[in-house]
Image (tube, rainbow, N blue to C red):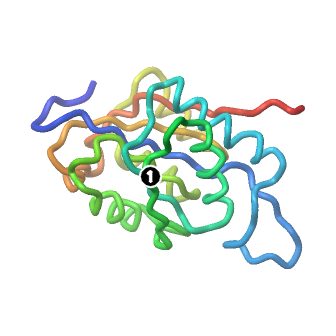
């Protein structure tokens, strides 16, 4: 369970970008979403609404596929929160991702991180000291496109989120329906 500590319950919601296309001659940073990704990203936004996980702030990689995932997911909400486009999230490893999270204001209680693997999967595995049900095992097996992992912990500031201190409360993989 979540260790009770000082400060409010905080949630880090980790969203891997939706399925991307591989157009010939297009640099990796500029790859757009594939048709499946354009279906799955709104499903991810709806899943966040259904789970009552709307963030106070979103940090999003500047890669086209991550920005498109954010735009399609957040379009499912009445009023999207502020988003901070973060170039450092592209191809980021765990220390880079943690640095971005640690830089977030303590007023933010639910933070959404939109980015890429393998960094996001490794971040979830590093931060989760335990999980509900078999969520941790699911992440260990695969953290696919559009996957959402929710990490919960108590703290007065984001700098207090360190490896092993969070509880992985859920891991879901929303998929949109073909028309």
In depth, the one of 108 and 154 nearer the eye is 108
Q: Which residue position is annotated with label 1?
A: 58
In depth, the one of 132 and 172 nearer the eye is 172
Q: Which residue lies at the image location 27% right of the left edge and 59% below the top edge? A: 102
Q: Which residue lies at the image location 61% right of the left edge and 43% below the top edge? A: 75
Q: In the image, residue 54 lies at what x, y percent?
A: 45, 36
Above or below 113: residue 7: above
- Name the quarter where the C terminus is drawn: top right
Above or below 102: residue 148: above
Furthest residue to the top?
133
Crowd band around label 1 with a 10 angstrom C-alpha radius: few (<14), some (14–19), many (20+): many
Q: Is residue 31 left or right of residue 45?
A: right
Q: Which residue lies at the image location 41% right of the left edge and 41% below the top edge? A: 55
Label 1 sits on a secondary structure element that is strand
In depth, the one of 96 and 126 nearer the eye is 96
- Name the quarter where the N terminus is drawn: top left
Q: In the image, residue 77 lies at what x, y percent?
A: 55, 36
Q: Which residue lies at the image location 33% right of the left edge and 57% below the top edge? A: 101
Above or below 107: residue 98: below
In depth, the one of 93 and 49 nearer the eye is 49
Furthest residue to the left?
6
Q: Is residue 71 left or right of residue 59?
A: right
């Amino acid at each position: 369970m979540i260790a009770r500590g000082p400060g409010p319950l905080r949630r880090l919601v980790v969203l891997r970008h939706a399925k991307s296309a591989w157009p010939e001659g297009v640099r990796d940073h500029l790859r757009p979403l594939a048709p499946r990704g354009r279906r799955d990203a709104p499903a991810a936004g709806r899943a966040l609404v259904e789970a009552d996980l709307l963030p106070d702030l979103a940090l999003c990689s500047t890669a086209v596929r991550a920005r498109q995932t954010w735009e399609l997911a957040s379009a499912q909400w009445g009023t999207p929160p502020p988003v901070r486009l973060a170039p450092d999230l592209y191809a980021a490893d765990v220390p880079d991702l943690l640095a971005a999270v640690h830089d977030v204001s303590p007023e933010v209680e639910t933070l959404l991180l939109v980015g890429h693997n393998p960094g996001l999967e490794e971040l979830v595995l590093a931060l989760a000291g335990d999980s509900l049900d078999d969520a941790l095992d699911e992440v260990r097996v695969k953290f696919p496109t559009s996957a959402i992992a929710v990490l919960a912990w108590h703290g007065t500031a984001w700098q207090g989120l360190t490896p092993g201190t969070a509880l992985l409360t859920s891991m879901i993989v929303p998929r949109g329906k073909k028309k």
